[in-house]
């Protein structure tokens, strides 16, 4: 490949990492607390509220059922309101985040479901408040599962970011479409695919390492 092609590839990789990192951080910031609420408000749990749980569950399920490409188009007015534009890497972060929050919430709920109920009961018997139970018992015990879920989310975001590139989101997907597909450049297309594979492998390896480090079962 030429020097210009390498520069394009490097720039596209940076844009993809930027999109995935920021949208991942935002989805964890909002998705994990939402998952905690889904878990805690179930009947018999520390903040039981069946109605709240059903409403939250319905919203999460509805959000998860919308295909990402449709979500991107449907929220263009919101994206433009928040970022001032509907195209580019910064704009793509909005749909990437909204698509990931319900995904992270269900992952967090599943990880919390794996925490033995006896630990919660022991904490309650010692007078721990719901917030203390969540912060000192549930989240630390669910950490390996959360790490696994975070890894899965980041890998999914890589594929979503590539899809975002198809409609002007930038990154490796945009490079592959504009230069690899429209200009019939097989070398650029192959390089884009290889870089995406390497990126996913690196994320998975890092996630597996952290999972082993914190999993004491």
Image (cartoon, helix red, strand yellow):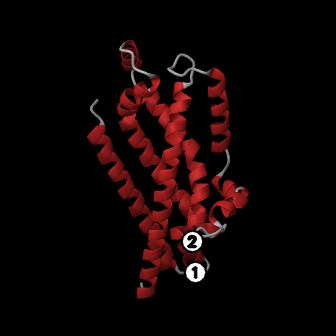
Badge 2 or badge 1: first in the primary sequence: 2
Between the residue at mark 2 and the residue at mark 1, the CA separation in whole angstroms equals 14 Å
Q: What element carries label 2?
A: helix
The quadrant in which residue 144 appears is top left
Q: Which of 147 and 82 is in front in this view?
A: 82
Mark drawn on residue 174: 2
Q: Position of residue 56 (x, y in %)?
A: 63, 33
Would you say residue 104 is visible in this rendering? no
Give the residue at x 42% y 62%.
197
Disc 1: which residue: 184
Q: Position of residue 193 (x, y in %)?
A: 47, 67
Q: Please count the marks in the image.
A: 2
Q: Which of 86 and 178 is in front in this view?
A: 86
Q: In which quarter of the image is the C terminus?
A: top left
Give the residue at x 42% y 57%.
200
Mark drawn on residue 4: none
Give the residue at x 42% y 68%.
195
Pointers 2 and 1 in contact (C-beta within 8 Å): no
On screen, residue 52 versus residue 119, left or right, reads right
Q: Nearer the viewer, residue 45 or 1?
A: 45
Would you say residue 78 is visible in this rendering? yes
Q: What element carries label 1?
A: loop
């Amino acid at each position: 490949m030429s020097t210009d092609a390498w520069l394009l590839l490097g720039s596209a990789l940076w844009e993809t990492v930027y999109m995935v990192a920021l949208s991942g951080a935002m989805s964890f910031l909002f998705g994990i607390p939402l998952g905690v609420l889904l878990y805690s408000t179930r009947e018999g749990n520390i903040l039981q509220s069946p109605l709240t749980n059903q409403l939250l569950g319905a919203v999460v399920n509805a959000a998860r059922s919308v295909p990402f490409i449709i979500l991107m188009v449907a929220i263009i007015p919101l994206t433009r309101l928040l970022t001032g534009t509907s195209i580019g890497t910064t704009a793509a972060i909005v749909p990437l985040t909204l698509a990931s929050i319900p995904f992270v919430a269900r992952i967090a709920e599943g990880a919390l479901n794996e925490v033995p109920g006896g630990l919660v009961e022991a904490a309650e018997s010692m007078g721990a408040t719901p917030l203390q139970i969540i912060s000192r018992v549930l989240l630390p015990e669910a950490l390996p599962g959360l790490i696994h879920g975070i890894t899965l989310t980041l890998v999914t975001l890589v594929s979503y970011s590539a899809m975002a590139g198809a409609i002007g989101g930038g990154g490796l997907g945009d490079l592959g479409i504009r230069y690899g597909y429209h200009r019939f450049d097989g070398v650029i297309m192959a390089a884009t695919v290889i870089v995406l594979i390497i990126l996913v492998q690196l994320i998975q390896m890092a996630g597996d390492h952290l999972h082993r480090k914190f999993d004491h079962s």
